[in-house]
Amino acid sequence: MDTDPTPTNTPIAGNPQWFNGCAIAGAVLTVLVILGAWGLAEFEKGLDGLGQLEQSGPSGSVADPLGPGATARYEDGLEVTVSRPRPESDGTYSLTVTYENDTDEAICPGGESSDESVSEYGPAPLVVRAGRSLDDRTSGYSLNWLNSRESAAALMPPLGTDKKRTVPVRIRPSTNTKGISVTVEVDPPAAGFRETAYFQLSLD
């Protein structure tokens, strides 16, 4: 006669049911932690507004500008990339500013008025100026934005969601000294707040 008082269906260490239960509990806990972290991140975005820059390297601020070829990434999905300036045979330089709209709605990169969409001095949705990002506009040299009307015209039409647009920029510096700095400021208009992204380039 079997007198073992231990019930055969009691989960104990070494029992496969015990291991399965722990594995399921661990998986559920992991999912809850991931969902909690995602919810917290979304909550923080809501507090900040979706016009904040979200960078893994330089922040893109005036004190920590992005470099040539870098991309400014906004929390709402807008991305703006400024190319490296390319020297031309006539002493001018060409670069591009590319907008990629991964937001949920169309945006107007140039704002409401073509007369105010670009500037060599600022403020405007797109500024291309002489000097480093922290300079107070007294760099000792200047730029002539040769195709500012073309650039403004490219900025004006609405940019639909999941669409990309490249704005051409052609500039002539007042000096042919190699290595002088150029700052590009990108401030796409928004219904709410959107940070200005700064890029610092070198004319080599």
Image: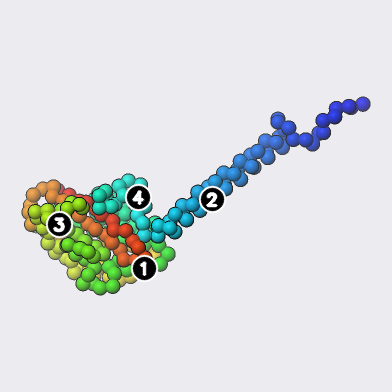
The residue wearing badge 4 is 55
Mark 1 vs mark 4: give the one in front. Answer: 1
* Mark 4 residue type: Gln
> Which mark is on residue 191?
1
Q: In terms of secondary structure, where does tag 3 sit?
A: loop
The quadrant of the rendering that contains the N terminus is top right
The residue wearing badge 3 is 137
Above or below: residue 117 compared with residue 203? below
Crowding near pointer 4: few (<14 within 10 Å), some, many (20+)? Answer: some
* Mark 2 residue type: Leu
* Mark 3 residue type: Arg
Q: In terms of secondary structure, where does tag 4 sit?
A: loop
Crowding near pointer 2: few (<14 within 10 Å), some, many (20+)? Answer: few
Percent x, y of residue 55: 35, 50
The residue wearing badge 2 is 35
Percent x, y of residue 8: 81, 33
Quote the CA–CA distance across marks 3 and 2.
47 Å
Q: Residue at x 78, y 35 (%)?
A: 10
Quote the CA–CA distance across marks 3 and 4.
26 Å
Q: Residue at x 32, y 68 (%)?
A: 108
